[in-house]
Amino acid sequence: MAILVTGGAGYIGSHMVHALVDRGETVVVLDDLSTGFEAVLPHQATLVLGDIGDEALVGRLIGEHAVTAIAHFAGSIVVPESVENPLKYYLNNTVKSRALIAAAVAGGVGSFLFSSTAAVYGEPIRPLIDETVPPSPVSPYGWSKLMTEIMLRDTAAAHGLRYAVLRYFNVAGADPKGRTGQSTPNATHLIKVASQAALGDRPYLSVFGTDYPTRDGTCLRDYIHVSDLIEAHVLALKHLMDGGENLTCNCGYGDGFSVLEVAEAVKRASGVDFEVRMAPRRAGDPSALIADSTRIRETLGWKPRYDDLDTIVAHAFAWEDALRKRNTRP
């Protein structure tokens, strides 16, 4: 029996692959390597190059490897890009997810983990967002993820597929053991971009929007360490495979940090006072997204270990520094 991880060579997916392998699981990774990297995968995992929208390929993998669960991380994730190119997001995140779910049903897969997002909530209607807040996305990215959530809900009702939807807030950091991290050179994650500015790979850090209704005018986000996020996935998968009910849970700490506060944390970690430039708002960016994670803590017994901004930033910066040295080595 095996677990199929889509997008398993990407940032979050590769952390999941390591976590599963560490626990002795058999793991098959399906990735087209458009944004993923084979080098970050453990040798025990089987990598298959392919498209998650290829229903026949997914069906063959399910049969050949006796796949009992799917952890679905593949997709496009840049909010401003989704505003500029919505059809790309509805194809990659919605249409292809539909094909993956169909293959799972046809192949008798019992459990399905879905990587969703706090972007399904849109602009917050109260300081802490819990799962009872009605979804109201403000970007095609958020809508594309919400559509997949709806497909899972309806498919589960019709076919008995058990699923867990994990709505991420802002994922950051890197594997504390240094095995994987955010490797995409042109990634838009704030902590990575700030780390690149500190290392001299970018001339400055742009802050998009300084007139939000927040304490310093910049966006507030709930930053969750990627290793804590993956622990939530592992617990959710065990819950499903033990016959637990379908779940939709937030993944965050309940603390919000502004863009400027994150920039200062990166300056502390790096010891570099890099330039910060103010820029206009980006389309699709809510002013604040902060999680109420009571449900996942109570239902799955999730207990974060790295819920400290300076720890998150230190791990992210260490990975970025190591990645830069590796890529510039003669």
Image (tube, helix red, strand yellow):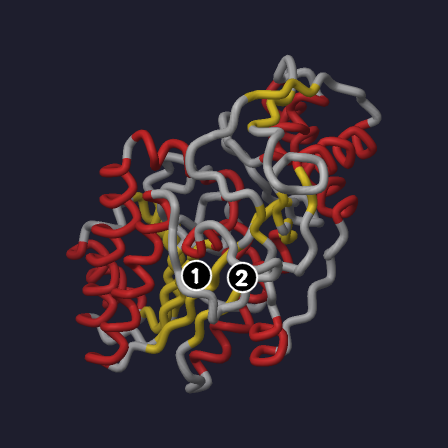
State the quadrant of the N terminus. Answer: bottom left
Residue 192: image tag: none
| Residue 243 at x, y percent in the picture | 42, 86
State the quadrant of the C terminus. Answer: top right
User: Which residue is found at the position 25% from the left and 65% from the top?
Assistant: 151
Say if 246 sits above or below 119 in the image.
below
User: Which residue is found at the position 41% from the left and 33% from the top?
Assistant: 80
Say if 309 sits above or below 104 in the image.
above
Q: Amino acid at mark 2?
A: Val
| Residue 320 at x, y percent in the picture | 65, 31
Q: Is residue 28 visible?
A: no
Task: Tell me the distance, in whole angstroms, between the alpha carbons under discs 1 and 2.
Answer: 7 Å
Q: Is residue 279 left or right of residue 35?
A: right
| Residue 46 at x, y percent in the picture | 40, 53
| Residue 35 at x, y percent in the picture | 41, 36
Q: Is residue 172 left or right of residue 144?
A: right
Q: In the rendered image, which residue does mark 1 sit on?
A: 27
State the residue lying farthest toward the bottom.
243
Q: Look at the numbered discs 1 and 2 and tell me whether their residues touch, using CB distance below 8 Å.
A: yes
Residue closest to the eye, 220 or 211:
211
Quick one: SS at disc 1?
A: strand
Chain-order first, disc 1 or disc 2: 2
Q: Amino acid at mark 1?
A: Val
Residue closest to the eye, 73 or 210:
210
Residue 21: image tag: 2
